[in-house]
Amino acid sequence: IEEIIAMLPHRYPMLLVDRVVEINENGLVALKNVTMNEPFFMGHFPGKPIMPGVLIIEAMAQASALFTIQVLGKESKGKLVYFMSIDDAKFRKPVTPGDSLYIHVTKLQNRGAVWKFKCEGRVSGAKTAEATVTAMIADK
Ligand code: BDE
């Protein structure tokens, strides 16, 4: 988590990746441990805690940014990953307190500063959400 904090500008309550469990040249797997203490459960929804789909997408974006920064290494210094588009997002199962949400990120394409990733959220091996995200690395 200390390395993640050094790589991403996000902080509580918007930092949505706890750990990178696996990384290779094609992508990574990141973990978001979802607990009842997430601030968003207060309102989404009272008595029926479900992680907002937009925040699952946000976790995917953060995990993709981590991959990009890791691949670029020193080249990423002084730069920021800007999200450009989200395509084909689907929400298949609700994510609830106690879930270990694994974000699987696979690189689809990299042309210059633009990177495209296929992302899947999984809980206990089951797909909860999927999306294609495109990001650009640029100066801060
Ligand atoms: C299913 C697939 C993907 N994402 C979310 C779902 C889902 O079951 N959402 N459920 C929302 C929901 C909200 C309230 Br308020 C409620 O009282 C109940 Br019963 C719900 O299932």
Image (cartoon, grey):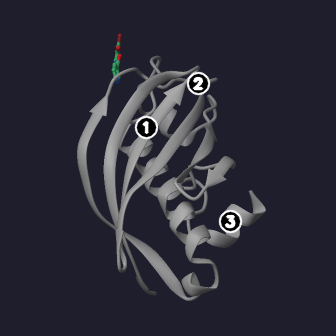
* Farthest front residue in view: 25
Provide the residue designation for mark 2: 97
Q: CA distance from mark 1 to mark 2?
A: 19 Å
Is residue 102 or residue 112 the one in the foreground?
112
Q: Which kind of residue does numbered mark 3 sit on?
A: Ile
Compared to residue 137, the image places residue 47 above or below, namely: above
Compared to residue 57, the image places residue 113 above or below, namely: below
Residue 124 lies in what quarter of the image? top right
Provide the residue designation for mark 3: 5
Disc 3 vs disc 1: Cβ atoms closer than 8 Å? no
Counting from the top left corner in percent of width and height, residue 101 is at 57, 33
Q: Within 10 Å of the Cα at label 1, are there few (<14), some (14-19), or many (20+) other Cα atoms?
A: many
Q: Ligand 1 appears in which quadrant?
A: top left
Q: Residue at x 64, y 52 (%)?
A: 23
Q: Residue at x 32, y 29 (%)?
A: 91
Counting from the top left corner in percent of width and height, residue 108 is at 36, 55
Between label 2 and label 3, give the one nearer the viewer: 3
First of labels 2, 3 by sequence position: 3
First of labels 1, 2 by sequence position: 2
Between label 3 and label 1, give the one nearer the viewer: 1
Disc sitting over residue 120 in the figure:
1
* Farthest left residue in view: 88
